[in-house]
Image (cartoon, helix red, strand yellow):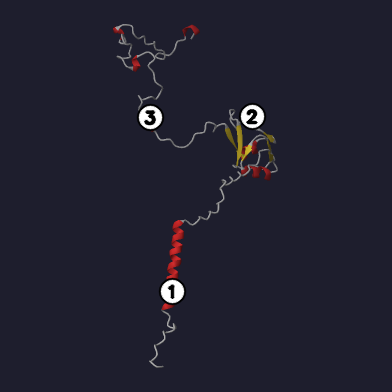
Amino acid sequence: MELNTLKPAPGSKRARKRVCRGIGSGTGKTGGRGHKGQRARSGGFHKVGFEGGQMPLQRRLPKRGFNSPTREDTAEVRLSDLERLRAEKIDLAALKEAGVVPAFSNAAKVIVSGKLTRKVALAGIAVSKGARAAIEAAGGSTDAPIPQPKPKPEPKWVAAPQPEAQAKPGKDEAKAKADKSEAKAKGEAKKAEARPDAKPEGKKGKKGE
């Protein structure tokens, strides 16, 4: 075999279709575009997925969950991975060099998986709550900040209820009070007349007496 005799495999290279080269070619006149219409025009193009104004398929289908675009940027590191490393001071570069995390990772986080029996010092690596306890129990340390609880939101300001001003009695109220007092006086007068201890009127005496 010589370099000047190398050729592509049969069928791997096909000649480009040359359109609009006469009716004998099968793609003459309209060049395979058909008669008229948007796709027959030069520049007649809509975005991919356009369905003529109809709700496109990618919008008709239901959506579920959330795919984070940065989910692969942070790699997970097990405690057993730290156990295998020989270095005592471990950072992201050391993890990449040892092949524990991918080369394109921008960060790493240690999770509770496996056992750690040796002392390690982590720098620039996040840790979970359980992993922090395991590292400190083995005599190691980490510079990851301890997460602080979020402060409770303060209640919104509410205006104090104002004492209602006493309304001045109107004409109708004054009239009703007057009628009530008058009726009360009449009732007392009737009761006084109906008392049994009232003095009877004196009898007329006989003549000559």
Q: Amino acid at mark 1?
A: Ala
Badge 3 marks a residue whose secondary structure is: helix
Which residue is painted at 44% across and 73% down in the image? Answer: 188
Residue that badge 1 annotates: 189
Res 63 visible? yes
Q: Is residue 20 left or right of residue 75?
A: left
Res 100 visible? no
Q: Of residues 46 and 72, which is closer to you in this image? A: 46
Q: Do residues under tags 2 and 3 come within 8 Å of each other at their CB atoms?
A: no
Q: Earlier in the sequence, mark 1 or mark 2?
A: 2
Q: Label 2, label 3: how many angstroms apart (C-alpha)?
A: 45 Å
x and y percent of residue 47 in the render?
41, 22
Q: Do residues under tags 1 and 2 come within 8 Å of each other at their CB atoms?
A: no
Q: Earlier in the sequence, mark 1 or mark 3?
A: 3
- Return the mark for residue 90: none
x and y percent of residue 46 in the render?
39, 20
Q: Amino acid at mark 2?
A: Glu
- Return the mark for residue 57: 3
x and y percent of residue 168 in the render?
50, 55
Which residue is painted at 58% across and 34% down in the image? Answer: 75
Q: Label 1, label 2: how many angstroms apart (C-alpha)?
A: 113 Å
Q: Is residue 29 above or below residue 109?
A: above
